[in-house]
Amino acid sequence: MTYETLTVTLEDHVATVRLNRPEKANAMNAAMWQEIRKAFQWVDATPEARVAVLQGEGKLFTAGIDLQMMMAIGPQIQNECDGRTREALRRLILDMQDTLTSLERCRKPVLAAIHGGCVGGGIDLITCADMRYCSQDAYFTIKEIDIGMTADVGTLQRLPKLVGEGITRELAYTGRKCEAQEARQIGLVNRVFETREALYAGVREIAATIAAKSPLSIRGTKEMITYARDHSVADSLNYIATWNAAMLMSKDLTEAMMANMSKRPAVFKD
């Protein structure tokens, strides 16, 4: 596939999805919203891609939603019937939500590697990833409050589950910057790396470790953790029992056991 706003590569079972509008601080325009979904649908559907890394070109990870796109929404949804105008706006918001949910829906783990600024819609984006890592120069800000709107594509729904309600409210109400070390302390990111180069190398190493595991088991693990986040313990235990009744007796299980006994690396089918 070819992309206007992204670059997508695949090497050693690791797909790298790069936001690629550096001259616009990787602002998320209409094309990028659609291409992010296409990219992660491709990751999901491509057996050779066992894990994905999300990063950004240029000085910032992303400046968030492109303001020119925001300004174009009015004419795009306009209808002589006010009800139909507002229905069109709702459908547009739902479609943007679905774009970001494509990271969560992707069966393969998604690791976000964040440098520089991660602003507004960028927070919505990274909260959909499985894990987040950043460089020392990174900062995070829920900027929607400063342009007179309520964040509406995932931050307010997902961030409280990552860092807690209190700090989410503070960041969302004030729009202040959350620097890298604070992001680590509150659990927004798993680890802070000194430089951007160290960030990419470190995340690549983690991705390679994941890619070497049983792909079927990794996909099941992601499914179970995401499900458990939104369901009761009882429901989640019932789901994993049903899942493993279907998936446990795989060739991956046999290969992993034989490799452990033989003290050799396991080799799994994509």
Image (cartoon, grey):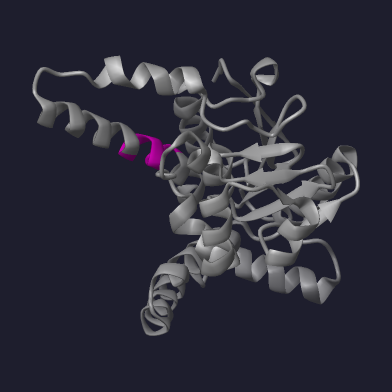
Q: Residue furthest left?
A: 81
Residue at the spot 80% in from the left edge and 76% down from the top edge: 261
Q: Is residue 97 magenta?
A: yes
* Left or right: residue 262 compared with residue 207: right
Residue at the spot 59% in from the left edge and 64% down from the top edge: 167
Segment colored magenta: 94-99
Task: Classify the position of the N terminus by image quarter.
Answer: top right
Q: How far across and how far down the image is residue 41, in percent?
A: 47, 37
Q: Nearer the viewer, residue 136 or 82?
A: 82
The vertical placement of 33 against 105, above or below, is: above
Magenta: main secondary structure equals helix
The vertical placement of 47 against 127, above or below, is: above
Q: How far across and how far down the image is residue 246, in percent?
A: 41, 70
Q: Quadrant of residue 204?
A: top right
* Left or right: residue 47 compared with residue 77: right
Q: Quadrant of residue 81?
A: top left
